[in-house]
Image (cartoon, grey):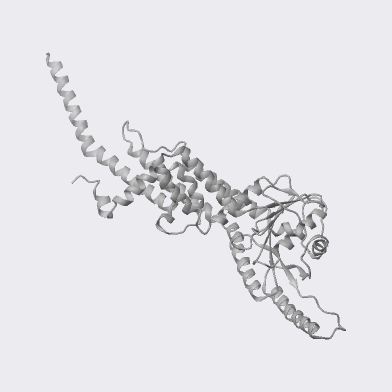
Amino acid sequence: MTKFVFFGGKGGVGKTTVSSAHALECVDGGFETLVVSTDPAHSTADVFDQEFGDEPQPVEGYDGLSVLEIDPEREVQDHLQGLKRQLSSQLSAAMVNEVDIQLEMAHQTPGAYEAALFDRFVEVMRTADPYDRVVFDTSPTGSTLRLLALPDLLERWIDRLMDKRERSIDLYEKAAIGNREPRRVMDGDPILARLRERKERFEFAGEVLRDDAAFYLVMNPDELSIRETRRSVETLEDADLPVRGLVVNRLTPEPDPDEEGRGARYLRQRVATERDRLERIEREFDVPVVATIETRVEEVRGSILEAVAAELEITIEGEGSVQSQ
Amino acid sequence: MTLADRIATFRAALEEWLRGLYHGMISHPAYEKIEAEAEDEEDGFMLACFPDAFGIPSPVSYYTAELLPYLEDEYEAWERRLWDRRSLVERKGHQYHF
């Protein structure tokens, strides 16, 4: 059953709009829905005209819809602070400084944001019981989706670490010939315990993503967006996470036939190019285009959002009524 | 002192000598060697955990950083070994009592 729906895509293609609209669709279908946004700019706040925070918060005016905004920066800082607290309670003063530097560095690495996000995603999936649908509006960095493709790799990595650790402990135990106390013992080794815990998390994430999740990519009818989408489709497919559909957003509206003028000519030309591109998308991608959404003059919010939701054709299967417009 | 007593003393002394000899020749170098091997394994583990200590960025450092609080002894010893290990020959050679 699809419980988790991910929307990815290049920055600025309208992921937030599409995922919010899909969430509305789910709510209309009678599902308790949670929208998880990772956009540091917090555009969900703009769409629903309401401030959200780190905890799921119900959206005013919509029954059964909640929003959770994750701030990756804060997640990383929290992780760092937690480790530091643990450090000072466990390590001798001389070592704390030494290890502190190492910690700071680990949290500055390029992957730290994504790792923190991934952690939080897993957390959300673990505690998603009260909701029938969880819609992830993934961050525009694009690497979030790539990270979701990683659990297998990370699992293997952890396996390797555990193997190394076990071998060295085993040798230490063997080195303790006679009555000597081994320098390390296998039972209750905190490192192994921690690694095992991590591994279980990755396994859980991998399972959920394969079995209960659906991926959609949002794109605009332009070359850059098409190329980026192709890459994303490949990455996800390599990780056995097939993309269910493409949403083409920001299509140019066609002018009325009786309109003649520069504006109308411009629009007609654009529409023609976009139609070509749309055909190409449909021809070249194995993934079906599930929805095309016309560009709106105003920011998408409120009643316009509902109109956009009506344009979406993402079938939501599951128990309860099936809803598709 | 009876003959039996003298034999017993002699045997005790011999046993101690033999044990010492065995320990010195076989068991002591053996566990030293195994321990050195264990240390090498551990170094590999540490290197896999903290490649960024050498300026190699790693996508998992964020996760392995969680292990640091438990790695006090290992981390210190690892660093010391890294400083000491001027060459592989020295490291591999020092365990043999030439």
Residue found at x 25% / y 38%: B28
Q: Is residue A32 left or right of residue A210?
A: right
Residue ranking furthest to the right:
A258
Residue found at x 46% / y 51%: A160
Q: Quadrant of residue A234?
A: bottom right
Q: Is residue B76 left or right of residue A325?
A: left
Q: State the count of labels.
A: 0
Q: Quadrant of residue A166?
A: top left
User: A192 or B30: nearer the eye?
Assistant: A192
Confirm whether residue A136 shows in the render. Answer: yes
In this rendering, the answer to whether A293 lies above or below A67 is below
Q: Position of residue A269 (x, y in %)?
A: 75, 83
Residue found at x 71% / y 73%: A282
In this rendering, the answer to whether B47 lies above or below A281 is above
> From the image, which quarter does the C terminus of chain A lie in?
bottom right
User: A150 or B7: nearer the eye?
Assistant: A150
Residue found at x 44% / y 51%: A102
Q: Position of residue A280 (x, y in %)?
A: 69, 77
Q: Position of residue B29 (x, y in %)?
A: 25, 41
User: A322 or A259: nearer the eye?
Assistant: A259
Confirm whether residue A169 shows in the render. Answer: no
Q: Position of residue B65 (x, y in %)?
A: 48, 49
Residue ranking furthest to the top:
B1
